Amino acid sequence: MTPILLSTLVLLVFSLCVNSAQLKGGPGAQWDYDQYNVGDWNRTYGITEPQQIHISISSQAEYAKVQFATQGEVHTAILNYWPKSSPHKSIVIEGGENWAFVDNGTAHHTIYLHNLQTLKLKPATVFQYKVGTKDSHGKVTWSKGEFEFHTARRGNTVNFVATADLGLVNAVAMPALQRLAKSHKYDFLTLSGDQAYDMADFNGTKGDEYMRFAENLFANIPFMGAVGNHENAYNFSHWKNRFNNVPFQKSGFSNPMQYSYDYKSLHIVAWSSEGAFEGSTNEILTSLNWLENDLKEANRNRKVRPWIIVLGHRPMYCTSFSSPTDGTCITETQTIREGLVDPATNTRQHGVEALLKKYKVDIYLCGHRHNFERTYPVYNGQVTSKSYHNAPSTFQYLVGNSGNYELTIPFNTTGPFPAWSASRYSGYGFSTVKATQHSLELTHYGVDNNGTHERVIDHVVVTKD
Ligand SMILES: *[C@@H]1O[C@H](CO)[C@@H](O)[C@H](O)[C@H]1NC(C)=O
Ligand SMILES: *[C@@H]1O[C@H](CO)[C@@H](O)[C@H](O)[C@H]1NC(C)=O
Ligand SMILES: *[C@@H]1O[C@H](CO)[C@@H](O)[C@H](O)[C@H]1NC(C)=O
Ligand SMILES: *[C@@H]1O[C@H](CO)[C@@H](O)[C@H](O)[C@H]1NC(C)=O
Ligand SMILES: *[C@@H]1O[C@H](CO)[C@@H](O)[C@H](O)[C@H]1NC(C)=O
Ligand SMILES: *[C@@H]1O[C@H](CO)[C@@H](O)[C@H](O)[C@H]1NC(C)=O
Ligand SMILES: [Fe+2]
């Protein structure tokens, strides 16, 4: 066989394998319990028993907001929390925000959602909490479990865990993520979009199952995620309702699609990359104008908070492909960077890359491709520096490999890779970020298919004068 024929054959066989490499439980499909779905979250819950519990924080972890769901309407929702070291200083919050969330499928499946915010929290404290519901006779049904989180420690170090693209099936990184959450070594968890695949499936019941499954993680570390394309059903209503406890009101955005917060040396923004793919021009402008104002304000505080990280789902740069005709890393990336073509002028408008550069954003933290890839500081397709010291532009960090029905996505094996692609890994994993006033240290860990083994895949330290 000639080398060309052979490589064509290899590519063909490879792409056939890639296309068929999927498990049950993808969008619209039934799923089966697997080795990662451990716990008793799939039991039968009482009508007013709290489920799907998850926590989020506002800037500096001054306040936490806990959200949970019940199958039926409740009289009064309750949050009870106390410092782990002083259980007698227990605080009870009653009432909160309560609403019915009606899935837009034909069954109009309805769950009842409850948001309860803490009072101003003491720093450097481990808190325990539980949630409950009280009936009209004052009888309380508590959550089966108690959960923990902590507020900002003394000193200027902050640590967080970064992931994306987490499924209900094949959630390979889940055991490690849960372990990290409970270790209290990490202050919060970012998740750059796409969960459950999809929450709206089967009249929204897959979303309930996923949120029960994820409780063991999301109730034990503040969830600070961004929205992805797999949350797009019914104008992103599952995202807007189920993650309504993210601090969007405090960030001046009208709904949970976008928000920002400060944590010691960090300013972190959760941005929706879906505008160009789903939204009207008006929505795109609302999204980007808010982002620009937020970044402008963050730059006024740059001495105190030198690092700005923007979370979005879709990448501006990637090199992987899932079939030879997959344009994700070609056309979609250009749309994110430069925006859509305006037919009137035939030029691209409302991209995000110029904004990130203008406001000196350090990292664009994304997912969408189910693998890991880090770029050099890059702008407009050109490497601006091979060093991460005083980088002249943003670099991108893609962590879409926590595990889901689609397995991981391989890279173009024929290469050569674009100069901006600094590091790639097509196994499962997650990242941790350690930030001080002087440096940002990013470590990517690989996990094996059995979810146990962790090893360092990639490590980079970012500094500036
Ligand atoms: C709950 O999950 C376990 C696996 O962890 C599975 O064996 C069991 O069948 C599930 N129970 C129900 C009621 O679906
Ligand atoms: C949604 O609910 C309707 C009405 O109960 C039912 O007919 C339909 O099969 C459900 N759809 C799915 C995908 O489960
Ligand atoms: C969802 O359903 C509600 C009420 O049933 C309706 O007001 C709303 O327009 C629907 N939204 C979408 C995006 O389908
Ligand atoms: C979708 O939601 C956005 C808010 O995120 C709103 O501005 C827009 O009008 C909604 N679109 C439709 C078609 O309802
Ligand atoms: C793989 O990379 C090579 C070199 O950049 C390119 O010519 C080829 O089209 C890529 N293949 C796919 C399937 O993306
Ligand atoms: C997990 O997988 C790795 C590599 O495949 C293996 O070395 C390790 O023993 C496995 N651990 C368990 C608990 O099965
Ligand atoms: Fe995605």
Image (tube, rainbow, N blue to C red):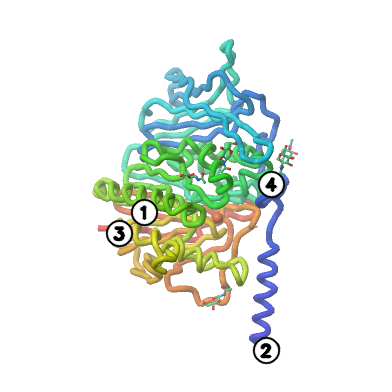
Residue 92 at what x, y percent from top left?
46, 19
Identity of the residue furthest to the front in this view: 344
Which residue, given by chain and number where applicable, does mark 4 sit on?
A: 35
At label 1, which amino acid type do we have?
Leu
Closer to the camera: disc 3 or disc 1? 3
Q: Mark 3 to mark 1: distance in Å?
A: 20 Å
Q: Amino acid at mark 4?
A: Gln
Binning the other alpha carbons within 10 Å of mark 4 as few (below 14), some (14 to 19) or many (20 upward) gives: few
For label 1, the SS is strand
Q: Earlier in the sequence, mark 3 or mark 1?
A: 3
Please identify, in this view, whether the residue under mark 2 or under mark 4 is nearer the observer.
Answer: 2
Name the amino acid, label 3: Lys
Q: Which residue is mark 3?
A: 358
Q: Position of residue 272 (x, y in %)?
A: 46, 50
- Quadrant of the frame with the C terminus: bottom left
Q: Write the residue at 37% across / 65% down.
A: 377
Could you say where residue 453 lies in the image, as x and y percent from the top left?
Answer: 59, 53
